[in-house]
Image (cartoon, grey):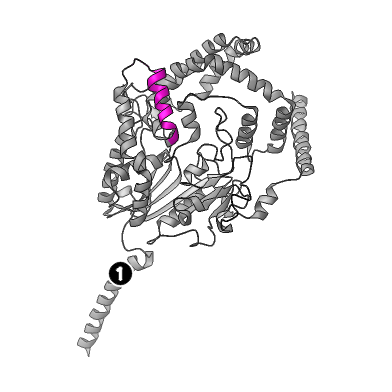
Amino acid sequence: MKQIKRMLCVLLCLALLLSFAVLPVSAEGTTEACPQIYVHGFMSSTLYENKDDPNSKVIWPPDVDAILADAKEQIPTLVGALLVNNWQKFGDIAIDLVKPYFEPTYLADDGTCPNNSGVYFRYPPTWAIPKNGRVDFDYDWRLDPMTVADDLHAFIEYVREATGAEKVNLSCHSLGGVIVLTYLSKYGHDHVKGVCFNTTAIYGETYTGDLMRGDIVFDADAVDYYLRYALDNNEYEALLTGLISMANKSGLLDLLEHKANGLVKSQKERVIRELLLPMFGNWLTIWSMIPDKDVPDALNNVFNVLCKGEDRSALRAKIDAYNTTVREKKTATLQALNEDLNVYVISRYGYSSIPVTPSFKVLSDGTVDTRYSSFGATTSDYDKTLSDAAIKNVPAAFISPNKQVDASTCLFPQQTWLIRNLKHATTPQSVWKLIDLLLAQDTQATVDSFPEYPRFLNYDETTDTLSADTAEAVKSEQLSFFERLRLFFQQLKQVLEMLFARLKKN
């Protein structure tokens, strides 16, 4: 009897050991490690004077307080020059003011770094890399995407070896999409399980093409629209946007437009040659974010007009290498990617574009055109909606509730989410929750996979939440004239009371 008991105990222990051995897999619901590597966007990391020393001087972002302190002494002179249309004097002061803060970021004429400036990035220790979590890839966003793609490849191999993962997931934002696409173009996707392109500039940004073609202009409506973007969710939004709108309708912004365009006409070429060209012109990432249609004119403007007679053949060769390796094949690369692994696209809309080019009415997230970040959606201008004729034969499921977006023309319409009222610069936690959910799927998910995440979503900044966008949600944001007037005077009263309280206290 004792022997039987002992045998039963042994069998029971073996059964328990076996159950413990398989328990982690069944409990987690995954069969293998698959870390997520995040590739950030343009200007999203700090540049140091010495990339090997994080205690060295920060050269980007520039010290705004220092610039303002320097500018404070020059304000009377600058205003005086503007009032009398002395554009030359204004240009002399303004360029001398900002140039010292930009110069440390300049690259050589071949697009390489002439010093040791850059990003301080060290691989995390192997034990700190989560097998199914997210790890960041940091890089110098000025440099050639072809070179940065090599660095990303090395980092992916490091993460795979550290975690024992056969494949990784990739998520990317803005310029990060260009870097990821370049990596995929050069190295293929054998070691990638899924990719989420989060508001990326793979297909470009209209305003970047405008700037590189030298098409700079100021418009009163552009200022009006962009300040609405900047003030969205501000505590005194109704008051400030109301004042701006009144200034626009009364002609005050037209005066500003006239002054600004006078300055542009007089100083544009000088500003481009002395500030923008040495910086943006040599940043190869800028060239990668020019829309296809603008590339020929941008190349002609920079190499045949602005830099005529200069030897910039090395820079041109690198631009051409990206264009032939990545740009010309990007749609085919994305389609091939979609055949073999899970692909997701997140785009944003609800705002106008940068207000210094003629393309300011482009529907965007404040930076990247929605039509480009969505890989092909048909969109109206910021201040308009799609015509009834344009959407007559399009299924209603593809039309945004505010009738500004037709998602049926996207490259991957069933794998593209469009979020209204979400600005470009950041990715809030609610969006990360969606990205992580999508990349956790073993098979391709679509806009029909999760009821809480349909094709069209609305972002609420005050609560950091995503919800289904509906015609009712759009209508609720469109306040009546009297409601806007009520909010305007209510906020005006609050500001006046605050000012009087401070005056009384002093």
Name the residue at the bottom extreme: 1
Within the image, what quadrant is residue 115 found in? top left
Q: What predominant SS class does the magenta segment belong to?
A: helix
Type of residue at label 1? Val
- Expressed as whole percent of the image width and height from the top left, the position of residue 414 reads 47, 57
- Expressed as whole percent of the image width and height from the top left, the position of residue 455 reads 53, 55
Q: Residue 172: in sight, yes or no?
A: yes
- Expressed as whole percent of the image width and height from the top left, the position of residue 255 reads 68, 20
> Which of the image's four quarters has the C terminus?
top right
Q: How many marks?
A: 1
**Left or right relative to 147: residue 251:** right
Residue 130 vertical position relative to residue 14 in the rendered view, above or below:
above
Seen from the viewer's position, the closer of residues 405 and 197 is 405
| Residue 297 is a magenta residue | yes
> Which of the image's four quarters has the N terminus?
bottom left
Residue 179 vertical position relative to residue 69 in the rendered view, above or below:
below
Q: Residue 121: in sight, yes or no?
A: no
Start and end of the magenta stretch?
Answer: 293-310
- Identify the residue under disc 1: 22
- Expressed as whole percent of the image width and height from the top left, the position of residue 247 reads 72, 27
**Residue under the point 24% across and 86% down:** 5
Question: Which element is circle 1 on?
Answer: helix
